[in-house]
Amino acid sequence: MAIVEPAATPRGGAAGTLLALTNISKRFQTERQDTLALDDVSLEVRAREIVCIVGPSGCGKSTLLNIAAGIDPHFAGTATFEGQPITGMARERAVVFQEPALFPWLNVRANVEFGLKLRGVPKADRTPIVDQQLALVNLSKFDRAYIHELSGGMKQRVQLARALAVEPHMLMMDEPFAALDAQTRDDLQLELQSVAGRIGATVLFVTHNVREAVILGDRVVVMSRGPGRVRRVIDIPLSRPRTPDDHDVADFAAMVRAELQESSSEAEPRYAI
């Protein structure tokens, strides 16, 4: 397995920790059921780092991301961002969901500038920002198109451009490519690597797909079956860009898959790599 040594200034190495989740536990309680979704989970994400979380269905991956994003404020433990407690959603943390949360009555340009408009950014200042983000995700020629005219991959590009337009300090992505066909998924994995590299983005990325986690991640967090715990964190010191056909990607994917299979019973479904 050929491993490329990281650069002298690796992602997040000098800039420090942006996100710190410490001893996070989360229960979902109803009249009939009390479910422990997360149990004593600790995780740090450093600046300019892509961290991917993988694990079985129901292990609390999305729950952990929702806590980090400030969507779910009810949990035990400590969650901080840039040294401050996370008490709710904030513009510094942009969330990209599996299903594009776009406005069908607005065209691509209007969707991308929506967050800027909410912040009160003047129209004259919004225009060059939107132009830049559309160019970044290769959608400049489609700025006047409406959402129903776009493919699934293009919709996700719009969602990514809208998130980047407000200049977040971290992107939090919850299985954003899961519903796409294999070729589009491969294309967007390359696109995200390229965008993150060009702007120095920090990304927390949840996925069920082991190979996707290895392609994108500087580190892969492997979670155990529910209640979710961190089983192992695996460094992925490979050069970029990475593709599904890379032998080194396959080797690391096999390592991650072995961790997942070890924590699973034989009756459970196998994991895609």
Image (cartoon, helix red, strand yellow):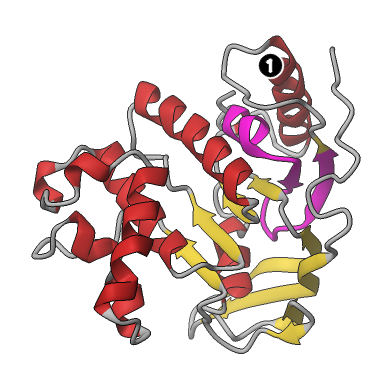
Residue at 52%, 81% in the rendered image: 89
Amino acid type, residue under disc 1 in the picture: Ala
Q: Is residue 49 visible?
A: yes
Q: Position of residue 84 (x, y in %)?
A: 74, 86
Horizontal relation, residue 202 to residue 46: left or right: left
The part of the image, by quadrant, that contains residue 85 is: bottom right
Q: In the figure, 80 relative to 248: above or below?
A: below
Q: Nearer the viewer, residue 250 or 265?
A: 250
Q: In the figure, 97 relative to 91: above or below?
A: above
Residue at 47%, 64% in the rendered image: 95
Q: Nearer the viewer, residue 167 or 23?
A: 167
Residue at 53%, 43% in the rendered image: 195
Question: Mark 1: which secondary structure?
Answer: helix
Q: Which residue is mark 1?
A: 250
Horizontal relation, residue 31 to residue 68: left or right: left
Q: Position of residue 99 (x, y in %)?
A: 32, 53
The part of the image, by quadrant, that contains residue 272 is: top right
Can you name the residue that lies furthest to the front here?
124
Residue at 60%, 56% in the rendered image: 61
Q: Quadrant of the C terminus?
A: top right
Magenta segment range?
A: 211-234
Q: Nearer the viewer, residue 37 or 105?
A: 105
Horizontal relation, residue 121 to residue 248: left or right: left
Does the magenta-highlighted stretch encompass residue 112? Answer: no
Q: In the figure, 6 relative to 159: above or below?
A: above
